């Protein structure tokens, strides 16, 4: 049982988790408790402090006219103010980071593109050859030829989505390391980690978007809304090694933290990809890494962590 400094009577903690005046302060580095009733997936970002009760000033608070006698937390500094333009800072950090490690990102993107084209060509040749054999058996088999063609296209589409998802996961994982000052090497883009949950998350997202796109008129817009709120799903999954459902929940929470600025960032990122696609697709080898690095920087800032540029 926690007692008073004299050790005579039990202490009654305040409802917000802080000790009453007169008790020893928390040890250095001890984080303040979250606000009462906080149920979020991520801890509150720097600057979000619990509300104070009337007559009970908080430890370390800067309330006018109040000073705790004889106490000063070692090394205490006020958290840096939040940037006024999160989307602008994130995009700027993405371009600056690309300027330092962009070469290895572009090289890995080119190699993965060649691998993807080769795999899809092999799969398409297998299903296309099977359809041609079946379709050469006469008129009755033409319907079977059509079935073979559609089945082949279906499997090629699934394989293409899985390859794209796994490749995206590699770039996201490396980008998260880069935002902590790590300088990547080429081999890191071909090291599969947490692949099972990545595939499951891709299937969940793909099925959800596919169902929404079937809805007339508004289906496409609803699919875009899902894509927006799942902007950070792979970042949460690979950074925290969570399950797909938790990654979805964490992504929704992060996008809601700064909804307006995240919308602007999403639109600007889409503009980057659109301009890159206009340049005969070659611009995508630059636009894609920049967007991934910018999103990783935004993810760090929304989770309360200051991103670092690699040396």
Image: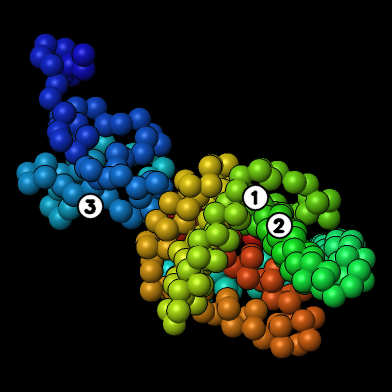
Give the residue displayed 45% in from the left and 79% down from the top.
216
Ranked by sequence position, the earlier of labels 2 and 1 is 2
What colouring method underlies this structural image?
Answer: rainbow
Give residue 120's position: percent from left, percent from top: 84, 64
* Left or right for 46, reference 1: right
- List the residue tagged with mark 1: 199
* Left or right for 190, reference 118: left
Q: In this view, does 104 lie above or below 7?
A: below
Camera-nearest residue between 217 and 263: 217
Circle 3 sits in a helix, a strand or a loop, which is it?
A: loop
User: Can residue 5 be spotted in the picture?
Assistant: yes
Confirm or deny contact between disc 1 and disc 3 (CB under 8 A). Answer: no
Number of the front mark, 3 or 2: 2
- List the residue tagged with mark 3: 62
Give the residue displayed 69% in from the left and 71% down from the top.
288
Circle 1 sits in a helix, a strand or a loop, which is it?
A: helix
* Left or right for 220, reference 98: left
Circle 2 sits in a helix, a strand or a loop, which is it?
A: helix
- List the residue tagged with mark 2: 162
Give the residue displayed 19% in from the left and 27% down from the top.
23
The local crowd at label 3, few if under 14, some if 14 to 19, many if 20 or more residues have their Cα within 10 Å, is: few
The local crowd at label 1, few if under 14, some if 14 to 19, many if 20 or more residues have their Cα within 10 Å, is: some
Number of the front mark, 1 or 3: 1
Between marks 1 and 3, how big is the CA–CA gap? 49 Å
Confirm or deny contact between disc 2 and disc 1 (CB under 8 A). Answer: yes
Give residue 210's position: percent from left, percent from top: 55, 66
Ranked by sequence position, the earlier of labels 3 and 2 is 3
In what quadrant of the picture does the C terminus appear?
bottom right
Q: In which quarter of the image is residue 21?
A: top left
Q: For residue 89, which numbered disc appears in the image?
A: none
Between marks 2 and 1, how big is the CA–CA gap? 7 Å
């Amino acid at each position: 049982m926690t007692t008073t400094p004299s050790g005579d009577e039990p202490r009654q903690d305040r409802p917000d988790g802080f000790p009453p005046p007169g008790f020893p302060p928390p040890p250095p580095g001890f984080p303040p408790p979250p606000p009462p009733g906080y149920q979020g997936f991520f801890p509150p970002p720097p600057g979000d402090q619990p509300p104070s009760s009337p007559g009970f000033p908080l430890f370390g608070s800067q309330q006018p006219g109040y000073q705790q006698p004889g106490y000063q937390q070692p090394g205490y500094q006020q958290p840096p103010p939040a940037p006024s333009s999160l989307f602008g800072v994130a995009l700027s950090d993405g371009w600056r980071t690309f300027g330092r490690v962009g070469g290895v990102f572009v090289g890995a993107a080119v190699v993965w593109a060649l691998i993807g084209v080769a795999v899809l060509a092999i799969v398409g040749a297998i299903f296309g050859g099977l359809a041609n054999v079946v379709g050469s058996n006469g008129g009755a088999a033409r319907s079977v030829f059509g079935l073979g063609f559609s089945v082949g296209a279906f499997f090629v589409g699934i394989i293409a989505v899985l390859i794209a998802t796994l490749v995206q996961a590699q770039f996201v994982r490396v980008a998260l390391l880069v935002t902590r000052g790590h300088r990547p090497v080429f081999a890191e883009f071909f090291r599969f980690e947490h692949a099972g949950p990545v595939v499951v998350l891709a299937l969940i997202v793909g099925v959800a978007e596919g169902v929404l796109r079937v809805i007339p008129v508004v289906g496409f817009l609803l699919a875009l809304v899902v894509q927006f709120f799942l902007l950070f799903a792979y970042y949460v999954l690979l950074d925290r090694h969570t399950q797909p459902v938790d990654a979805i929940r964490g992504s929704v929470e992060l996008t809601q933290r700064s909804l307006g600025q995240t919308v602007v960032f999403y639109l600007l990122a889409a503009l980057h990809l659109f301009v890159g696609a206009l340049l005969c697709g070659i611009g995508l080898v630059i636009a894609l890494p920049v967007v991934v690095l910018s999103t990783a920087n935004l993810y760090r800032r929304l989770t309360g962590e200051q991103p670092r540029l690699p040396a």
